[in-house]
Amino acid sequence: TSTNRPHCRTVAALDGTGIITMNNSPAKARAVESMRARIIRLRVVRWRENMRSIRFSAGVSLLILIAVASARAQTPPETPTAPPAAVARGPWMEYGVRFGPSFTSLTSVETFEPSDVAAAIEPTLNFGGFFTIGLPGPLSLQPEVLFAAKGHRIRDRNAPPISTTAGLKPAAADRVILVRYLEFPMLLRLAKQMGETGSVYLIGGPAFAIRRSAVVRDVADPGRLTDIGDLVNGSNLLYVFGAGLQHKRWLVDARLTRGAQNVAVDPQPSGVKTNAFSVLMGVRIK
């Protein structure tokens, strides 16, 4: 017995899911629909998983931002950094006046008069003005103009000694050799800042002096003068060195001034040089 089977025409086609569908086959059509539904469910599951991952990443990022902001809010403010060091100022100039005592002496006073000998130093007074001109770094120039005097107390070589309870003492000075100068020190100043308003400094340099007068003055009668201008040179060269302290506008320094050349017109038997130890106070006007 022969069984006749109907011939089915099968048409293959692609649907939107990418699955091959078979026309005119109900069983296969159901299988395809089942597979299509399964694929859609898988795609939905994957989309939900992706969205869950995106939400998780966004949440973590938000938490990190909140944590950073909270930590920054709780962190104490940074200590302000010190401002950069002040740039060294350019050229500058100050000026003022100064005055103070000097304790002076002359070497070889017998050169002026062989019958005289040195007896004691002579205190004098200086006054004048100064300029301070700034240089790079801690250095500056300090030219000055000073009215100064150098001298020595003398006595006669043959003056009898004085009898005291302690014994015999040389006779006291009865005259003073006094040479007055107009001095022009040209000093180099090296300063070190001490706090905001003070400094210490060293000074040194040459000084040129012009003689204003030269006399021998009587101690007992200061108005009694003997001119010795013809025995003393008209100029002098000295060198100065010392140290000082400045506070705001006020300054004080101690200095030694030593003669660098002979001041006697006739340096026989030996030359005469001037020496002084001075304590000068000053005030800066500008």
Image (cartoon, rainbow, N blue to C red):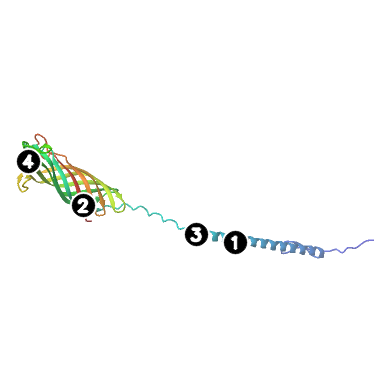
Is 269 situated above or below 220? above
Find disc 1 in the rendering and name its residue. 59
Residue 105 spot, x, y in % from top left: 14, 41
> Is the C terminus in the top left, top right, bottom left or bottom right quadrant?
bottom left
Find disc 4 in the rendering and name its residue. 231
Q: Left or right? Give the position of 66 relative to 160.
A: right
Q: CA distance from mark 4 to mark 3?
A: 87 Å
Find out whether the residues at labels 2 and 1 contact each other: C-beta distance under 8 Å.
no
Residue lying farthest to the front in this orientation: 165
> Which element type, helix, strand or loop, lies under badge 3?
helix
Residue lying farthest to the right in this orientation: 1
Find disc 2 in the rendering and name its residue. 282
Q: CA distance from mark 3 to mark 1?
A: 23 Å
Mark 2 or mark 4, which is nearer the start of the sequence?
A: 4
Mark 3 or mark 2, which is nearer the start of the sequence?
A: 3
Name the residue type under label 2. Answer: Gly
Find disc 3 in the rendering and name its residue. 74
Q: Nearer the viewer, residue 134 or 110?
A: 110
Mark 1 or mark 3, which is nearer the start of the sequence?
A: 1
> Which element type, helix, strand or loop, lies under badge 2?
strand
Count neighbours of disc 2 (C-alpha within 10 A) and say few if under 14, some if 14 to 19, many if 20 or more.
many
Name the residue type under label 1. Answer: Gly
Mark 3 or mark 4, which is nearer the start of the sequence?
A: 3
Question: Residue at the spot x=25%, y=51% of the render?
Answer: 246
Is 281 situated above or below 60? above
Q: CA distance from mark 2 to mark 1?
A: 76 Å
Q: Depth-wise, is mark 4 or mark 3 nearer the camera?
A: 3
